[in-house]
Amino acid sequence: MYRQENKGEILSKSVSKPLYVELYEQILKNIKDKKYSCCDKLPSENIFAKEFGVNRHTVRQALSLLKDEGVIYTLKGKGNFISNIQVPYSISEKSSFSQKILDLGYEPKTKLISADIIEPTDDIAKNLGLSKKLKVIELKLLRFANDLPIAVSYSYFDAFIYREIINNLDIKPLSLYRVLNRCYPNMEITKISTIFEAKNPSAEISELLMMPSNTPVIAATTISKNQKGEFVEYGTSYSRADAVKIKVDLI
């Protein structure tokens, strides 16, 4: 299907399949063969066009297929990047998201999307052991690894007991783990339950994670308590299924 020339691999222009599909298959093969490293920036559309002897429209169609499958992602003004980061989600570990990303050799970042005090739904109130008359803090965070958005989290706290959270969201770099540690340094937080589900993302989550709305995400719903057995946090994190692996410690 392909022949090698000095300037690169030229597509055969086979009549059996569209040219952009051939190009998609070749770029995908190059990614799997590790021609490009994890999180590397891919060549530009112009370079791909010259390398494979096609026009930019064909390149754009091939890259669109790769994006639809979650193989690559686009950063506006920066280009296309390989998205094969896999962050371990541990049910038992207490380490922060940022530390896990650093341990993998990536650059972590957390962006605060919103912080509001709201009336809880029945589900939120029940899982925080609250009356519906009491309000809760809702934190919406977008988490990145090497500029790739990999998870959106919605966290809920009793708005009276944990009111100091709202006043400490200016911590740099932002980390919910660090915010809680600053506000309540003597508190030990432990996950008491985590439920994993595969779900189709909402329009908001799909847009934030830069992925198609028909691509499932992993939803991890967690309840945490302190050393006194009191509810601390209830929330759900929606992660790209291609960027997270679940770790379960049995001992």
Image (cartoon, rainbow, N blue to C red):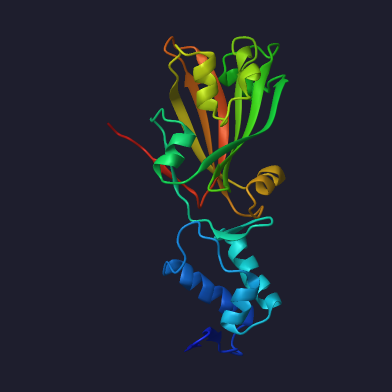
Tally the numbered discs: 0
When asked about the image quadrant of residue 123, the answer is top right
Q: Which residue does the image show at 65% across and 66% down from the upper left?
A: 64
Q: Nearer the viewer, residue 180 or 44?
A: 44
Residue 54's quadrant in the figure? Answer: bottom right
- Residue 98 visible to an observer of this rendering: yes
Image x and y of residue 130, in percent = 61, 13
User: What residue appears at the point 61 percent right and 90 percent down from the top-left corner?
Assistant: 15
Q: Is residue 18 visible?
A: no
* In the depicted structure, whether residue 86 falls above or below residue 22: above
- Whether 160 is drawn above or below 119: the answer is above
For residue 118, side relative to residue 220 (left or right) = right
Q: Name the foreground residue: 108 vs 250.
A: 108
Task: List x then y, in percent, for residue 241.
Answer: 52, 49
Give the image location of residue 249, x and y in percent: 32, 35
In the image, residue 12 above or below residue 60: below
Towards the viewer: 19 or 97: 97
Q: Quadrant of the C terminus?
A: top left
Q: Residue at point 61% right, 19% down?
A: 168
Q: Nearer the viewer, residue 33 or 247?
A: 33
Residue 149 at x, y percent in the picture? 59, 46
Instruction: Work out whether 221 lies above or below 102.
Output: above
